[in-house]
């Protein structure tokens, strides 16, 4: 692929990326997350529509964008969350979801609807917390008891599927996969320890003082870390995805008091350049003909996402949240898109997912983002809003929780 083709493709992708926030700003009634518009723009300029540019010419940059998706998702997660009461309940809900998903997708596999059920089973357990954060903040859904449980459920719905992806899809040999997970964990521990080592000298202080200057040492080291993770494989394997997610979690702790500053810079370089390329590229490579040939498959996956991921919340959060709040939580946790796009792209490359299933999953994810959060907001407006600083439910009053005393903004950005 020659350089001119790459530049031409980047030009049209940049045009879509630049037009998306302008469209949202000029049409405030168009309450659609930007990720949906980026995918739609990719479809329009892709080979199945206008045919502007070549997706293969920007695949490397798309890989970096996918890496930033998981890096920033990991950066949203506070590790202490998983030891809290909301974290434990969120993990219980996710494991119930995973068990139900395995059974349901096994039945679909037996019926011939799916070929390799593991990617689809994982897809039904995901939650698009990062995509929904602006909407949730706008409607004051991140505060109080409900907000803490919502953030925990979303964080688990992002982290655990990534772990499952790395374990079951990244490497055929399960022993090697476990060894890879252990290695990534060891690297994460080493990075965390390096902060304490550097803290004893002047190097860390020099790096922090220079973070607003032209050398941008912390940001460059972060990009280097991500590049190392991606360069570890000849093609974009899923253990690198896990590494990017864990790198985000470690970076939040490693940055310490500079975490907020680094977060702004990562948002700027990720959401400003690399991540839009990934989503537009995904739209350009989406198999629209498969969706058009089998639209009911999209509806089926959307219904399964709501049933498999959402319904367990109605059971797990009994006695903790009111029935209206449990319904809101079910609708929000069933909303997914970025991980579905990632799974579809990975499945397309390694042949573990039928193209029509990958396209249908992305289509179902788009519908979930368009429909389910709006339904949750409508349910919330019909009920009496909960005060922002309500304490834990009586059933958990004996279980003091440091996370529940913190604002959710300290858990996810």
Image (cartoon, rainbow, N blue to C red):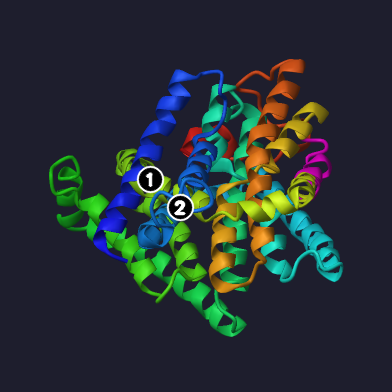
Which residue carries the number 2 mark?
Answer: 281
Quarter of the image where the N terminus is located: bottom left
Dots 2, 1 in contact, CB < 8 A: yes
Q: Kindly report the secondary structure that dominates the magenta region of the rendered protein.
A: helix
The one of 321 and 380 positioned closer to us in this rendering:
380
Q: Is residue 240 above or below residue 404?
A: below
Q: Is residue 69 above or below residue 212?
A: below
> In x, y percent, where is residue 128?
59, 44
Earlier sequence position, callout 2 versus callout 1: 1
Q: Name the disc covering residue 323, or none.
A: none
Query: Secondary structure under badge 2?
Result: helix
- Residue 259 appearing in the image: no
Taking the spot 44% from the left edge, 21% from the top edge, the residue there is: 25
Mark pair 2, 1: CA separation? 8 Å
The one of 24 and 186 positioned closer to us in this rendering:
24
Give neighbour class at mark 1: few <14, some 14-19, many 20+ (Cα, 10 Å): many
Taking the spot 33% from the left edge, 38% from the top edge, the residue there is: 264
Question: Which of the 4 quarters of the picture holds residue 141?
Answer: top right
> In x, y percent, where is residue 394?
77, 31
Taking the spot 41% from the left edge, 62% from the top edge, the residue there is: 56
Compared across the picture, whether 215 is left or right of 40 comes to: left
| Highlighted magenta segment, given as a residue range | 307-320
The one of 230 and 327 positioned closer to us in this rendering:
230
Query: Secondary structure under badge 1?
Result: helix
Magenta span contains residue 164 = no
Question: Which of the 4 quarters of the picture holds residue 325?
Answer: top right
> In x, y percent, where is residue 145?
66, 31
Which residue carries the number 1 mark?
Answer: 13
Q: Residue furthest front?
A: 50
């Amino acid at each position: 692929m020659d350089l001119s083709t790459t530049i031409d493709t980047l030009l049209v992708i940049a045009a879509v990326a630049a037009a998306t926030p302008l469209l949202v700003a000029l049409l405030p009634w168009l309450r659609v997350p930007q990720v949906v518009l980026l995918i739609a723009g990719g479809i329009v300029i892709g080979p199945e529509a206008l045919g502007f540019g070549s997706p293969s010419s920007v695949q490397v940059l798309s890989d970096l964008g996918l890496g930033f998706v998981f890096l920033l998702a990991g950066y949203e997660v506070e590790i202490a969350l998983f030891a809290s009461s909301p974290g434990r309940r969120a993990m219980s809900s996710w494991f119930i979801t995973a068990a139900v998903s395995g059974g349901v997708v096994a039945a679909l596999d037996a019926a011939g609807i799916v070929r390799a059920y593991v990617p689809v089973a994982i897809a039904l357990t995901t939650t698009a917390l990062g995509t929904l954060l602006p909407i949730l903040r706008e409607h004051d859904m991140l505060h109080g008891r409900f907000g803490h449980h919502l953030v925990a459920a979303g964080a688990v719905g992002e982290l655990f599927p990534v772990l499952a992806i790395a374990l079951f899809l990244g490497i055929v040999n399960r022993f090697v996969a476990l060894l890879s997970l252990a290695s990534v964990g060891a690297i994460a521990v080493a990075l965390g320890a390096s902060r304490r080592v550097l803290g004893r000298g002047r190097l860390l202080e020099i790096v922090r003082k220079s973070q607003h200057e032209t050398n941008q040492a912390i940001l460059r080291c972060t990009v280097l870390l991500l590049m190392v993770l991606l360069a570890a494989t000849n093609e974009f394997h899923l253990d690198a995805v896990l590494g990017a997610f864990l790198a985000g979690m470690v970076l939040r702790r490693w940055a310490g008091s500079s975490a907020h500053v680094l977060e702004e810079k990562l948002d700027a370089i990720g959401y400003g350049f690399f991540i839009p390329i990934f989503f537009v590229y995904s739209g350009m490579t989406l198999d629209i003909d498969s969706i058009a040939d089998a639209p009911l498959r999209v509806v089926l996956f959307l219904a399964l996402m709501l049933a498999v991921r959402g319904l367990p919340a109605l059971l797990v959060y009994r006695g903790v949240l009111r029935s209206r709040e449990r319904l809101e939580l079910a609708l929000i946790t069933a909303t997914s898109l970025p991980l579905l796009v990632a799974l579809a792209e990975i499945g397309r490359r390694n042949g573990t997912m039928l193209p029509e299933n990958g396209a249908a999953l992305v289509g179902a994810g788009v519908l979930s983002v368009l429909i389910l959060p709006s339904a949750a907001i409508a349910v919330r407006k019909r009920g009496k809003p909960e005060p922002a600083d309500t304490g834990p439910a009586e059933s958990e009053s004996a279980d003091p929780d440091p996370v529940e005393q913190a604002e959710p903004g300290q858990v996810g950005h």
